[in-house]
Image (cartoon, grey):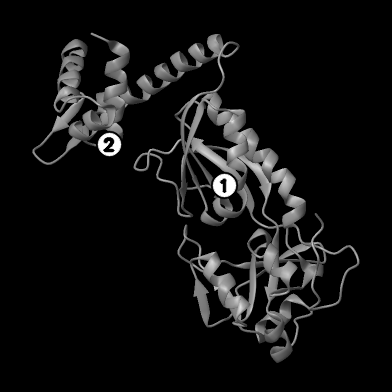
């Protein structure tokens, strides 16, 4: 019996919850995964799966086998990569989830250069903002904004996403410009809804050396940050958003930054992958690429004028 193949098949069966789906995904004939698992059970002398007409479930021994098999395969892969690393460039498929705005405005334009440098790597980018489903979407990693406490993952910080508070000039002419964070209570605020929690995002400001959190009022709330920006352009209200999403709007004058003296640090940006999986070399070089990309763009995203312009004036970003 090919023990390594049996481990790989059984892990995929456990992840997909289906013998047929595992066979299809691995490119085997229908029924191959079932035969391999039965052979593995005969060899082990224990039942690893409980089968019914509608679904399968891992036994206690099956759960233990999956965890140990993952560790063994990770050790084998790491050994092979260490031995061949000096002679081989990073290669293979990476499937990564990245929020849509970051994909479109930041990552995608830089990817041709990354592929030119690492031609052996194939990338599949899923543009999503919800919690990553590593098993269902077959993800190797995900770029996430904010903390990741819900999933058992290993994270690498990439820095912060500078946040900015903006409004359209026409709105400020009509309603006045907020001078202090407390003034927000008298304004229409365009809120954004977290895809992770389903609740409106709390606005943050930095005042007297402390973080101030405000649950803002407002008639409009969007799950899509791009939709929130579109509403702000048309004078719908004040909006707090990641500055990279409004960089061009501020440069063009469509939006104006306000409350610059109270600018928050912004949410964390990190790339995560499942704790039980090894990190292949191709993922390591992609993480390095994202970290370098973030460092190069942070000064551009952090739209700020060293001359401290008055309220409502256009803040010109430094290049």
Q: Which comes before the other along the chain, label 2 or label 1?
A: 2
Mark 2 vs mark 1: in front: 1
Residue closer to the observer: 246 or 11 = 246
> What residue is at 77 percent from the left and 77 percent from the top?
180
Would you place residue 133 above or below residue 76 in this image?
Answer: below
Residue closer to the observer: 260 or 89 = 89
> What residue is at 58 percent from the left and 28 percent from the top?
118
Tell me the element at label 2. Answer: helix
Q: Mark 2 highlights which residue? A: 16
Residue neighbourhood size for the residue with mark 1, other residues' Cα within 10 Å, grouped as few (<14), some (14–19), many (≥20): few
Residue neighbourhood size for the residue with mark 2, other residues' Cα within 10 Å, grouped as few (<14), some (14–19), many (≥20): some
**Does residue 7 appear to the left or right of 225 in the view shown?**
left
Would you place residue 290 above or below residue 205 in this image?
Answer: above
Query: Which percent across, then down, holds residue 156?
Result: 61, 38
> What residue is at 79 percent from the left and 69 percent from the top?
260
- In the drawing, what numbered circle is on residue 298? none
> What residue is at 86 percent from the left and 77 percent from the top?
310
Tell me the element at label 1. Answer: helix
How far apart are the two marked residues, 2 and 1, measured between alpha carbons? 30 Å
**Does residue 68 appear to the left or right of 95 in the view shown?**
left
Query: Which percent across, then down, holds residue 91?
Result: 50, 24
Question: The C terminus is located in which quarter?
Answer: bottom right
- In the drawing, what numbered circle is on residue 108? 1
């Amino acid at each position: 019996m090919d023990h390594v193949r049996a481990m790989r098949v059984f892990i995929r069966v456990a992840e997909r919850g289906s013998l047929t789906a595992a066979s299809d995904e691995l490119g085997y004939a229908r029924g191959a995964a079932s035969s391999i698992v039965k052979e593995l059970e005969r060899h082990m002398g224990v039942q690893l799966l409980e089968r019914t007409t509608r679904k399968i479930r891992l036994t206690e021994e099956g759960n233990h086998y999956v965890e140990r098999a993952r560790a063994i395969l990770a050790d084998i892969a790491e050994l092979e990569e260490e031995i061949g690393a000096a002679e081989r460039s990073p290669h293979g498929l990476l499937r990564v989830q990245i929020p849509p705005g970051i994909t479109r405005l930041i990552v995608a334009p830089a990817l041709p250069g990354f592929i030119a440098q690492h031609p052996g790597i194939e990338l599949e980018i899923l543009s999503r903002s919800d919690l990553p489903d590593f098993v269902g979407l077959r993800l190797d990693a995900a770029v996430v904004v904010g903390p990741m406490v819900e999933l058992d993952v290993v994270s690498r910080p990439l820095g912060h996403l500078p946040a900015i508070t903006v409004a359209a000039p026409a709105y400020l002419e009509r309603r006045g410009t907020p001078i202090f964070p407390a003034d927000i209570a008298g304004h229409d605020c365009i809120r954004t809804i977290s895809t992770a929690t389903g609740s409106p995002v709390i606005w943050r400001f930095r005042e007297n050396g402390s973080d101030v959190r405000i649950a803002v009022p407002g008639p409009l709330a969007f799950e899509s940050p791009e939709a929130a920006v579109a509403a702000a352009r048309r004078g719908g209200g004040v909006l707090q958003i990641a500055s990279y999403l409004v960089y061009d709007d501020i440069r063009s004058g469509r939006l104006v930054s306000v409350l610059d003296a109270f600018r928050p640090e912004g949410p964390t940006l990190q790339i995560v992958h499942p704790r039980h999986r090894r990190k292949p070399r191709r993922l390591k070089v992609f993480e390095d690429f994202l970290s370098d990309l973030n460092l190069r763009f942070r000064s551009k995203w952090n739209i700020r004028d060293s001359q401290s312009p008055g309220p409502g004036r256009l803040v010109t970003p430094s290049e």
